[in-house]
Image (tube, rainbow, N blue to C red):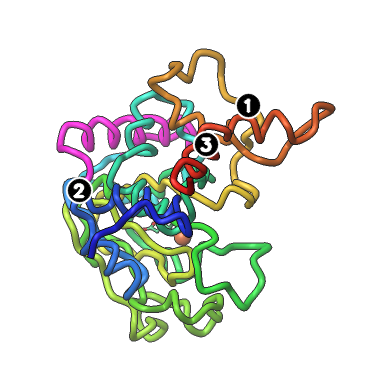
Amino acid sequence: MRIDNWTACPDLVDVYRDIEALGLEKHLAELEAFGFTVIEKALDDDTTVAMRDRILALAEKRLGNSLDLENETEHKETKYAQYLLFEDPMFKEAVTNRKTLALIRYLLGKRCILSSLGSHVKGPGGPGLLLHSDNGNGYPDPFPPYSQVANVNFCMTDYAEEKGAFAVVPGSHRHARQVTPAERGLDGNERNPHAIAVEVPAGSAIVFHGNTWHGSFPRKVPGLRVNLAAFYCREYIQPQEDRTHVPDGFLDGDADAELAGLLGRDLIHGWKEEGPKKLYERRQEDVGRVRSWQS
Ligand SMILES: O=C(O)CCC(=O)C(=O)O
Ligand SMILES: [Fe+2]
């Protein structure tokens, strides 16, 4: 089928073209069908190792103790190291990753924004991160069928079930509701029988719909399981992190224009005395493009 500049859905045409150009059609089908997909080698090996080391250094500082990637036994369960983007410009590459962002924009719209960037650092012991949908507090059931939020978990270590891999219930994005307490377990008798482990190498990205039931299995062996979770939301949804502040010098002009958009620079709401006009003006370029298709 030839995809023209259809005026009925110009943003979707743009997003779809990106997906085609990047060869991601199969991933799009998996996302639609099962509520998640995996892109292997989303990050190259050097980048994965550099990000993982940086995350661990930051987590050590935040937790106030040292962490041993290979042999850890004391750091039990999952700790979330939050608000990482401004800690190091290297994380820009994850947030703006072309492939993962193309799929996120399919789910959330072209003007989606970054909700948060953090890392789940998990050691051995405990029940794992119980199944949940990322439609968290304040998202009442029933969920709409489309994503309100969506997530990219970059695997910073190799994932296997006994190592504390990502857990998912395939197809659960269609349930359109939160997981009940009885369905949440991932270990022993409590284990949800439909949950599967996503066993993939470090550098992979797991992209998932906001309704999808997921969590992570308990780690049963020494060492750490580390991710980098880039969490996005539709532009009209309140992001998890404070977006009123970006450190001076963090954004590098045109080179970071896309990141600035993800941090809310072009939001249509949030006007002061000047009213909505200024914000609409920022979108003139796009409006002009749509008009030229229509004429
Ligand atoms: O730790 C994991 O594997 C799951 C993380 C998670 O639930 C999330 O990023 O929303
Ligand atoms: Fe989650």
Residue 247, given in percent of the width and then of the height, sits at 56, 19
Residue at image x 34%, y 27%? 90
The label number, if any, that marks residue 202 in the structure image: 2
Q: Nearer the viewer, mark 2 or mark 3?
A: 3
Residue at image x 51%, y 74%? 145
Chain-order first, disc 1 or disc 3: 1
Mark yes or no: residue 221 visible: no
Mark yes or no: residue 50 visible: yes
The label number, if any, that marks residue 288 in the structure image: 3
Against 84, residue 199 (above or below) is: below
Amino acid carrying label 2: it is Ala
Q: Nearer the viewer, mark 1 or mark 2?
A: 1
In the image, is 219 to the left or to the right of 12? left
Residue at image x 28%, y 75%? 196
Q: Secondary structure at mark 3?
A: helix
Q: Secondary structure at mark 2?
A: loop
Against 206, residue 31 (above or below) is: below
In the rendered image, the residue lying farthest to the top is 249
In the image, is 269 to the left or to the right of 191? right
Q: Which residue matches tag 1?
A: 245
Magenta highlight on residue 59: yes
Residue at image x 44%, y 46%? 293
Residue range of the region highlighted in magenta in the rendering: 42-67
Chain-order first, disc 1 or disc 2: 2
Residue 34, given in percent of the width and then of the height, sits at 32, 74
Q: Quadrant of residue 54?
A: top left
